Image (cartoon, grey):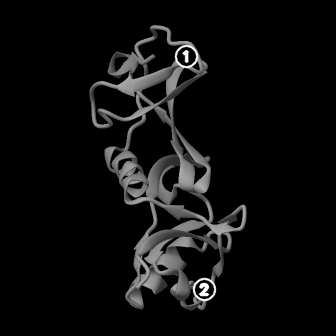
Amino acid sequence: MEDLKWYVMYTASRAEKKVADRLVEKGWEVYLPMIEELRQWSDRKKKVKRAMFNGYVFVKTRRNQLWECLQEPGAVKFVHFSGQHATLRDEDIEVIQRVVETGVDVESDGSEIDPGEKVKVIGGPLQHMTGEVIEKGNKDYFLIRIPGIYQNLLISVPRKFLEVTR
């Protein structure tokens, strides 16, 4: 019997939550990473939750059951890369979960790491993760690549928690 894998489902625009909820109701194991952000309107500010990856829901299933998952309204297709269904390893899902759980978004202390340098996080909630630094403005941004979906997570990490690796 084929192993369960995390497949990458593409959904209609802004339908991620509805599709995920319907799949869960039918008994599928689903992961929809949601992040909170502060939205500014003319009269107020409000924290809103949105999907971390627009249009993506992760479904743990077998390849021969993908068609069943696509029967939900709002489900469009499963993502392919070079003829293969896109899948994520459990470790990739865990990395995304750690990023979501920590809610990281912090200022850096200003000391320099050159863009493109490989770094390891040596403290804080993302400790032991490795990635690449992309510099933007006055912050140090840390890039984690999620290979199964060719997505990058850009995370602001305090400079004191980054160590350059060779």
Q: Which of 43 and 128 is in front in this view?
A: 128
Question: In the drawing, what numbered circle is on residue 107?
Answer: none
1 in relation to 155, above or below: below
Q: Do the residues labelled 1 and 2 touch (CB within 8 Å)?
A: no
Compute the Cα span from label 1 to label 2: 44 Å
Q: Is residue 122 above or below residue 27?
A: above
Residue 134 relative to residue 125: left or right: right
**Numbered tag placed on residue 70 in the rendering:** 2
Q: Horizontal and vertical percent for residue 154?
A: 53, 37
Determine crowd level at label 2: few under 14, some 14-19, many 20+ residues with C-alpha closer than 10 A. some
Where is residue 113? Give x, y as percent: 50, 12
Q: What is the secondary structure assignment of the residue under circle 1?
A: loop
Q: Compare marks 1 and 2 and give the one earlier in the sequence.
A: 2
Name the residue located 45 percent from the left edge and 71 percent from the top edge: 5
Q: Position of residue 48 (x, y in %)?
A: 48, 56
The residue at the far top in this view is 111
**Element class at badge 2:** loop
Query: In the image, which is nearer the foreground, mark 1 or mark 2?
Result: 2
The answer to whether 73 is drawn above or below residue 148 in the figure is below
The residue lying at 38 percent from left, 20 percent from top is 162
Tell me the quarter of the image containing the N terminus.
bottom left
Residue sitting at x 63%, y 81%: 74
Residue 28 vs residue 74, the one in the foreground: 28
Question: x, y (%) of residue 77?
Answer: 67, 77
Q: Which residue is denoted by mark 1 in the rendering?
A: 138
Q: What residue type is labelled 1?
A: Asn
Instruction: Tell whether 12 sits left or right of 30.
Output: right
Kind of residue indicated by mark 2: Leu
